[in-house]
Image: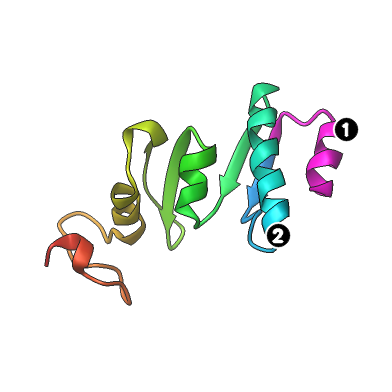
């Protein structure tokens, strides 16, 4: 939270948050979830990197998914669901329907 405050004192227009809730207590996560919409209201752009999909649906307008450093898709959060994003997270390329190594095939119907 101190880093966000410091960015605001510098009039930052873009803040990149990489797994911001990973090491926070529950009360700090609640504070973070109150601050993000306030920042958006101030026209601050936020890149919010997370594996917590509930945070994506709670805080974000758009999403972009990378798998192993490769872009697999993006879209509007409002027009998506958890299953669609998980499929993008596990996608292995055109014509491949099997899950990524170590993932269940339940979502692929195989």
The disc at residue 24 is 2
- Give the magenta part as a residue range: 1-14
Could you say where residue 11 lies in the image, as x and y percent from the top left?
82, 28
Q: How many residues crowd around disc 1 within 10 Å: few (fewer than 14), some, or many (20 or more)?
A: few
* Distance (Cα) linking label 2 and label 1: 22 Å
Compared across the picture, whether 39 is left or right of 9 comes to left
Residue 100 counted in the magenta span: no
Could you say where residue 1 lies in the image, as x and y percent from the top left?
79, 48
Could you say where residue 47 lies in the image, as x and y percent from the top left?
59, 41
Residue 6 counted in the magenta span: yes
Compared across the picture, whether 17 is left or right of 1 comes to left
Could you say where residue 81 lies in the image, as x and y percent from the top left?
32, 43
Closer to viewer: mark 2 or mark 1? 2
Check disc 1 and report the residue beneath it. 9
Compared across the picture, whether 5 is left or right of 30 comes to right
Residue 32 lies in quadrant: top right
Closer to us: 55 or 30:
30
Q: Secondary structure at mark 1?
A: helix
Q: Quadrant of the C terminus?
A: bottom left
Please give the name of the residue rendered at 69% of the width and 34% of the height, measured from the top-left corner: 14
Compared with residue 101, is residue 83 higher up or lower down, i.e. above or below? Answer: above
């Amino acid at each position: 939270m101190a880093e966000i405050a410091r960015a605001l004192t510098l009039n930052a227009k873009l803040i990149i948050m990489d797994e911001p809730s990973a090491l926070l207590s529950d009360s700090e996560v609640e504070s973070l979830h109150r601050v993000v919409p306030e920042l958006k209201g101030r026209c601050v752009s936020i890149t919010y990197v997370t594996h917590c999909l509930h945070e994506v649906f709670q805080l974000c307008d758009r999403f972009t998914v990378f798998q192993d450093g490769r872009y697999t898709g993006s879209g509007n959060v409002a027009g998506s669901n958890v299953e669609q994003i998980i499929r993008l997270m596990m996608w292995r390329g055109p014509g491949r329907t099997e899950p990524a190594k170590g993932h269940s095939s339940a979502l692929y119907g195989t």
